[in-house]
Image: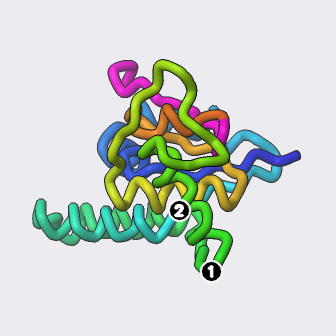
Amino acid sequence: MPGRYLLDTNIMLLLIKRASFGVAFEEAYRSQPDVFLGYSYATLGELDSLTRQNQWGPRRLGELVQLLRSFQMVPLAGQALIEQYGKVDAYSQGRLAEQPLPTGLSARNMGKNDLWIAASAATLGATLITADRDFDHLSPDFFAIDWVDISAF
């Protein structure tokens, strides 16, 4: 089965900011046959906000556009995505009746964009590539995670 991956916003930013990460990413993911590499609407929205807040100029915006074109936008909508959002949020709050948190894991609030990214990964059956630990409690029950240690780049 080909690899299916969803990129967290921080991975997209790393690809723009750190060439050494881009090389490692290419080797690790694009070298796979029939690989799917995508990003969600939430990531696109976060990127748009960050570029505005940090007043990116035409050169950096152009780099971002080129980067986005090299991946697939995941146009998810509908009942399956909504249900995954609800399950991920309820589970994270320790209030999903059919799937309680494991012993020793405490409830947590997730950011709304992270909830949409997690719901997208779960709906797609994709592995989430991320550089933060905000999603750790969801693996492996909702999706797999490939965690990137940014200190290596």
Q: Is residue 122 visible?
A: yes
Vertical comparison of 12 with 45: above or below: above
Relative horizontal placement of residue 57, taking residue 147 as reference (left or right) = left
Residue 27, visible in the rendered structure? no
Q: Say which element carries label 2.
A: helix
Q: What stretch is highlighted in magenta?
A: 141-153
Q: Which residue is drawn at 66% across and 47% down?
A: 98
Image quadrant for the C terminus? top left
Q: What residue did someone put label 2 on?
A: 86
* Residue 127: numbered disc: none
- In the image, residue 35 sits, relative to residue 56, either above or below, namely above
| Residue 95 located left or right of residue 72 | left
Residue 56 location, quadrant: bottom left
Q: Is 61 on the left or on the right of 87, as rendered?
A: left
| CA–CA distance in space, label 1 to label 2 | 13 Å
- Judged from this view, the residue extending furthest toward the bottom is 78
Q: Where is residue 17 in the image (x, y as percent from the top left)?
A: 30, 44
In the rendered image, residue 103, in percent from the top left (x then y), is placed at 53, 21
What is the residue that sits farthest to the front in this orientation?
Answer: 97
Badge 2: residue crowd in 10 Å (few <14, some 14–19, many ≥20): some
Find residue 91 and report its horizontal and vertical position in percent. Answer: 52, 46
Judging by the rendered image, the residue that carries numbered circle 1 is 78
The residue lying at 49 percent from left, 52 percent from top is 90
Rendered residue at 49%/32% (across/down): 136
Mark in front: 1 vs 2: 2
Q: Nearer the viewer, residue 55 or 121?
A: 121
Q: Out of 31 and 125, give the one closest to the viewer.
A: 125
Residue type, numbered disc 2 = Gly
Q: Residue at x 58, y 38 (%)?
A: 100
Please tell me whether residue 104 belongs to the stretch shown in magenta: no
Secondary structure found at label 1: loop
Give the mark, 1 or 2, whose residue is nearer the N terminus.
1
